[in-house]
Amino acid sequence: MNGLLRILLVVCALLVFVFIIRRIKKAEIHATDTIFWFLFAACFVLLAAIPQIAYFFSDLIGFVSPANFIFLFVIAVLFVREFISTIEIAQLREKLHTLTQEIALAEHKSDKED
């Protein structure tokens, strides 16, 4: 893995750290999401600091270049995160639907009492 990729990984990790800290200050992100993004950025730093990890896994999987492994790793992690977010959104939609129905029933009941 060349030096440019290692520098790029560290810069990206630092940008993620700064972005997450700004969002925390504005109270726009939850703790569980914060932990995920900090760990994700830490993985970038770890891969940049110890490139043998990328070499080991790229050899194990059969990639020609460790950079290809890093791209696959990033895509896979973000794909899993997107799937988890989709599940959370579906659950929130169901809760919203239930709450809307409960409010409508409560309003209907109070209208009948008047």
Image: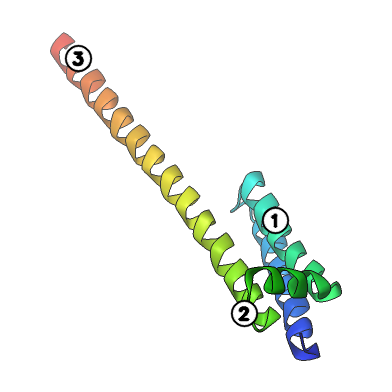
Comparing 65 with 6, the one in front is 65
Task: Say which residue label 3 marks.
Answer: 109
- Residue at image position (67%, 83%) is 65
Residue 93 occupies quadrant = top left
* Mark before the other along the chain sequence, 3 or 2: 2
**Residue 1, above or below 110:** below
User: Could you say where residue 62 lies in the image, as x and y percent from the top left?
Assistant: 63, 74
- Residue at image position (60%, 68%) is 74
- In three-dimensional space, the C-alpha distance between marks 2 and 1, rounded to whole angstroms, equals 35 Å
**Residue 1, above or below 86:** below
Asked whether residue 14 appears in the rendered view, the answer is no
User: Could you say where residue 99 lies in the image, as x and y percent from the top left?
Assistant: 33, 29
Q: Residue furthest right?
A: 49
Task: Say which residue label 1 marks.
Answer: 25
Comparing 34 with 105, the one in front is 34
- Residue at image position (66%, 58%) is 37
Look at the image and tell me in which quarter the C terminus lies: top left
Instruction: Answer left or right for 49 relative to 21.
Output: right
Comparing 53 with 8, the one in front is 53
Tell me the tag on residue 68.
2
Comparing 60 with 55, the one in front is 60
